[in-house]
Image (cartoon, rainbow, N blue to C red):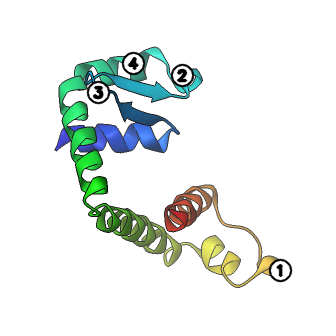
Amino acid sequence: MIAAAVLETLRDVGLHLDLTPERTIKVKPATLLNDELRTLIRSHKDELAKLLEAEIDAHERGLDFWKKQTRWRERSTAYYLHHFGCADCIAAGRGAGYGERCADGAALWVNYQESAKT
């Protein structure tokens, strides 16, 4: 499902999408938008609207809990698959005196930690 991947990409860059009653998509913060992202949104507008509508419905029915859990698990898996193959990330996991994660591991770790908060 390409629209789901588009929606996740937009959220990963820090955008929040809302569906208005007129079925238009509002994007915040607008300062993060560039021409490429605008084109991506326009080319998938109808599919994104359907996904946002489904999310609203799921939230109203209390079914969005599992979506959050799935996202957390996906990011956890991505981080740990990297972690156990990277000496820098393994060392960093032992504590502050052992160094820092590599650039890839640090980015995966931040994503993992952010998803655990929601």
Is label 2 in a helix, a strand or a loop? helix
Question: Cβ–Cβ below 8 Å for labels 2 and 1?
Answer: no
Q: Is residue 84 left or right of residue 92?
A: left
Instruction: Name the N-terminal-most of marks 4 and 3.
Output: 3
**Residue at (58, 55) in percent of width and height:** 107
- Give the number of the mark in front: 1 or 4: 4
Label 4, on which residue? 38
> Residue placed at 26% from the left, 21% from the top?
22
Task: Tell me whether circle 1 and circle 4 mark residues in contact (CB < 8 Å).
Answer: no
The residue depicted at 66 percent of the width and 66 percent of the height is: 101
Q: Indicate the amino acid at tag 3.
A: Pro
Mark 3 or mark 1: which is in front? Answer: 3
Q: Is residue 13 left or right of residue 56?
A: right
Dot 2 amino acid type? Ala
* Number of residues whose C-alpha sits closer than 10 Å to that of mark 1, classed few (under 14), some (14–19) or many (20 or more): few
Tell me the number on the disc at residue 97. Answer: 1
Q: Would you name the residue on which mark 2 appears?
A: 30
- Mark 3 to mark 1 CA distance (whole Å): 53 Å
Instruction: Nearest to the eye among marks 2 and 1: give it.
Output: 2
Q: Say which amino acid is labelled 1.
A: Gly
Q: Which residue is mark 3?
A: 21
- Residues at discs 3 and 1 in contact (Cβ within 8 Å): no
